[in-house]
Image (cartoon, helix red, strand yellow):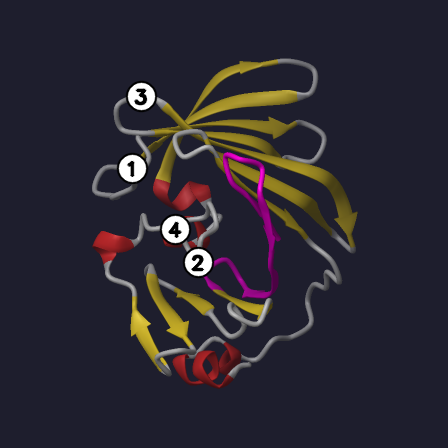
Amino acid sequence: MILIDKNRNQKQRIAEFLQKGDDKRIMRFTAPADQKGIAFLGLPNDVQYLYMPAFHKVRRIASHVKNTKFAGTDFTYDDLSSFSYAKDYNAKLLSQDDQFWVLELTPKPGVNKDYGKLKMWVRKDNYYPAKVEFYDKGGNLWKVMERRQIEKVGKYWVSKEMEIKDLKEEHATIMKLENIEFDTGLPDKLFTKRYLKRAK
């Protein structure tokens, strides 16, 4: 993972990411030393936890801070909670060409999101969202996420490189995936507060 500020200064971080189904996931930094052990746990029903090794404590992330960036990246806690857009958004087809469907996604009634709408480019050959624009509630373009190196790993399509840019803060995060494995039978005990704190 590479973090790039507005002066093009870069910071590199290495993380482990595990996921089970659509709504259980854990991300843990393994390097550099000052970030090692910082971990995020996402569970069903938008329940989220953060572990900070310096405090030796797991804390639940309150709903009013879920739009806060995770550990200096351009992903908010809400971004990390789920990549299942259908659960939280209504979709409308805006246009299409030979390669993409272009969709507009707006939050469903009663769903509290930091974004007013999303604009998504979905590939026609594999139904993979290759680009997403995030707009604030005033209709202004806020973030742009591009997914590159989209390849099939086993029976799943995956983006091996993802970049998200925060246009307001002139900051970007590039995430490169390595050592990708699917259907490994991860046990439920990995997705618990106890494991979040124990994991190093």
Q: Residues within 10 Å of mark 1 (few under 14, many from 20)?
A: some
Circle 1 sits in a helix, a strand or a loop, which is it?
loop
Residue 183 versus residue 164 in the image, above or below: below
The residue where tag 1 is placed is 108
Pointer 2 or 3: first along the chain: 2
Q: Identify the residue at horizontal 69%, vertical 36% (top origin).
A: 126
Asked whether the beta carbons under mark 4 and mark 1 sit within 8 Å of each other, the answer is no
Residue 2: give x, y in percent of width and height: 61, 49
Q: Which numbered marker is on residue 71?
A: 2
Q: Residue at x 37, y 83 (%)?
A: 56
Looking at the image, residue 89 lies above or below residue 176: above
Q: Amino acid at mark 3?
A: Gly
The residue mark sitting in front, 4 or 3, is 4
Q: Which of the labelled discs sits on residue 139, or is there none?
A: 3
For the residues bearing labels 2 and 3, Cβ distance under 8 angstroms: no
Q: Does the residue at mark 2 contact the one at mark 4 (Cβ under 8 Å)?
A: yes
> How far is the residue under mark 1 from the one under mark 3?
17 Å
Residue type at mark 4 is Lys
Q: Do residues under tags 1 and 2 come within 8 Å of each other at their CB atoms?
A: no
> Looking at the picture, how far across and down is residue 164, in whole percent?
53, 38
* Numbered disc 4: secondary structure: loop
Q: Is residue 83 above or below residue 49?
A: above
> Is disc 3 placed on a helix, strand or loop?
loop
Q: Nearer the viewer, residue 143 or 87?
A: 143
Q: Upstream in the sequence, badge 4 or badge 1?
A: 4
Front of the two marks 1 and 3: 3
Q: Secondary structure at mark 2?
A: loop
- Magenta span contains residue 13: yes
